[in-house]
Structure formats: C-alpha cells, structure tokens
Amino acid sequence: MQTARKSAGFTLIEIMVVVAIIAIMVGAVVLRIDFNNTGTTMRDNALRTQLLMELASDQAIYSRQQLGIRFHPKSYEFYILTANEAGEGEWTILEDDRLKFREIPVDMEFRVDISGIPIVLEELEDEIANVTDEDPIKPHVMFLSNGEMMPDFRIIMADSEGEHEYAIATGEVVPVVMESLN
C-alpha cells in the first residue's frame, strides 16, 4: 500500500516569484533615493560661500585693499578696487583661485537683500553689456581694509525645488553667519 506524502516546503517557482517581487520593490526604492544628496550639497555650498566671504574680509585687512562680492542668479564673483589710468578707483574681477565660484551638481539660485531691500540680480554677461562710465559694475557687499563689511546683507541660497534654503547674513557677534531656513 502506497501512501501520499505532502510536501511541507515551497516550490522553486514560488520562491522565484517572491524574489522577483522583492527585486521590483527594492528597485522602486533605489530610484527614489537622491544620490546627489541635494541637502548636504546645498549646506556645504552655503558654508563654503560664508567662509569665502570671511576669507575675503581677512584678505582685505591683511593686504590693505578693498574687496567685494557681486551676486548673480546662479553665481558670484569677487572684486578688488584698483586704480585705473586716471588714478581713480575701479572695481575689477579678482583673479584668485581660492575665491572663485565653483559649480555644484544642484540647480540653485541666489536671492540678495541689501539693507533689507531685495536686489534684482542679472547674469554677468548682461551686466557687462550694459556697463557705462557713469554706471560701472560694483560689488553688492564690500570688505574694507579696516575690517568693516558693508552694507548689511542677507543672501538666500535655495535649490530649484525650494526644499533646501540657507541664509548667509551680516552677523552681530561674528562677521558672517549662516542659517538653515528649512
């Protein structure tokens, strides 16, 4: 007499179906992960900008020259006050690799308030095209050789989705402060 045995395990097909479902779910989760880590990139870039502004302020003191920074919608550049042929002061772009804007893999923008008034930012190429002798390009913020930073400012750095925003502003205790707005 032969008795039927019941199997207590899973078949190979059942195991393969479960593995396939798990693989699909893991794939969906991995696609949602932000590999660029936008938040960290934005925070690091805001901190770098703050530190560069402090460096420019220190450099202005030690070199006894006037420096400045001018912002554009997606970049900035540092300026130095030099004498032109007529002996008059003229702001020119500072060629210093330490104080250069560096592109980041995040689409971000700057918004600038000077003494509480929002400033309309233009691209550098547009500003250069509109330069006249009566209206030369000048920095938004100046770092003077006596240690002053003027005028009071607040720069907002935000990613294109507005999820990560950082403010860099005139400090009361330290010259430049950075804070997260989110």
Image (cartoon, rainbow, N blue to C red):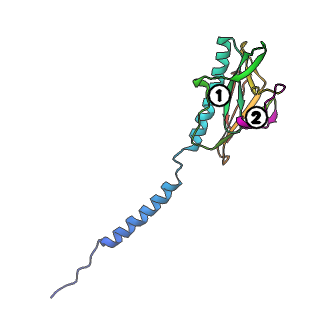
Measuring from the top left, give residue 160's x and y in whole percent: 66, 46
Q: Tag 2: Cα neighbours inside 10 Å, few (<14), some, or many (≥20)?
A: few
Residue 94 is a magenta residue: no
Looking at the image, which residue sits at the far left? 1
What residue span does the magenta drawing correspond to? 116-134
Q: Earlier in the sequence, mark 1 or mark 2?
A: 1
Q: Which residue is mark 2?
A: 129
Pointers 1 and 2 in contact (C-beta within 8 Å): no
Screen quadrant of the N terminus: bottom left
Horizontal arrangement in the rendering, residue 35 relative to residue 182 (left or right)? left
Amino acid marked by disc 2: Ala
Residue 63 vs residue 151, the one in the foreground: 63
Q: Residue 50, which numbered label?
A: 1
Helix, strand or loop at disc 2? helix
Measuring from the top left, give residue 115's x and y in whole percent: 81, 29
Q: Residue at x 78, y 26 (%)?
A: 152
Q: Is residue 84 above or below residue 156?
A: above
Horizontal arrangement in the rendering, residue 37 relative to residue 181 (left or right)? left
- Occupied quadrant, residue 128: top right
